[in-house]
Image (cartoon, grey):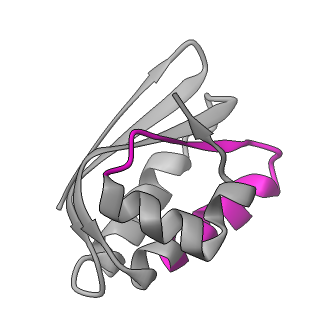
Amino acid sequence: MTIKHRIENHVLYIILSGELDECTSNFVRQKLDQILEDKNYQQVIFDFSELEFMDSTGIGVLIGRYKKLKQHKIPIFIYNPSSQVEKIFKMSGLYEIMPRIA
């Protein structure tokens, strides 16, 4: 699992590569919390174009980050999930709180 990020025009882009599951969730949670500490952004876009697999543990990681950012009124958007990840997002209702963007 690798996590890349950048800030452009007050938008934090986070690109997840690899697999987000029980084995990688602690690493991802800690790394995302470090990245999100810098509040020099007004919205977050998770780019899932390089994510190969995600299970329900990944949903928990995302919901935890959503709750932290909601306190600061910072919205999260989902970009380019694979068909497998898309299925999980739809089934879990995650798009209700983190809309998908094109």
Answer above or below: position of 48 versus 71: above
In the image, what residue occupies the spot 52% across and 64% down? 89
Name which quarter of the figure residue 90 lies in: bottom right
Q: Is residue 3 left or right of residue 39?
A: left
Q: Is residue 40 left or right of residue 50?
A: right
For the point 34% across and 67% down, the residue is 28
Q: Nearer the viewer, residue 29 or 23?
A: 23
| Highlighted magenta segment, given as a residue range | 60-82
Residue 78 magenta-drawn? yes
Q: Is residue 52 left or right of residue 80?
A: left
Task: Classify residue 95 by image quadrant.
Answer: bottom right
Residue 23 position in % (x across, y down)? 22, 85
Q: Is residue 45 visible?
A: yes
Residue positioned 33% across, 55% down in the render: 83
User: Looking at this view, is 88 or 4 the one in front?
Assistant: 88
- Identified at 29% across, 72% down, the residue is 27
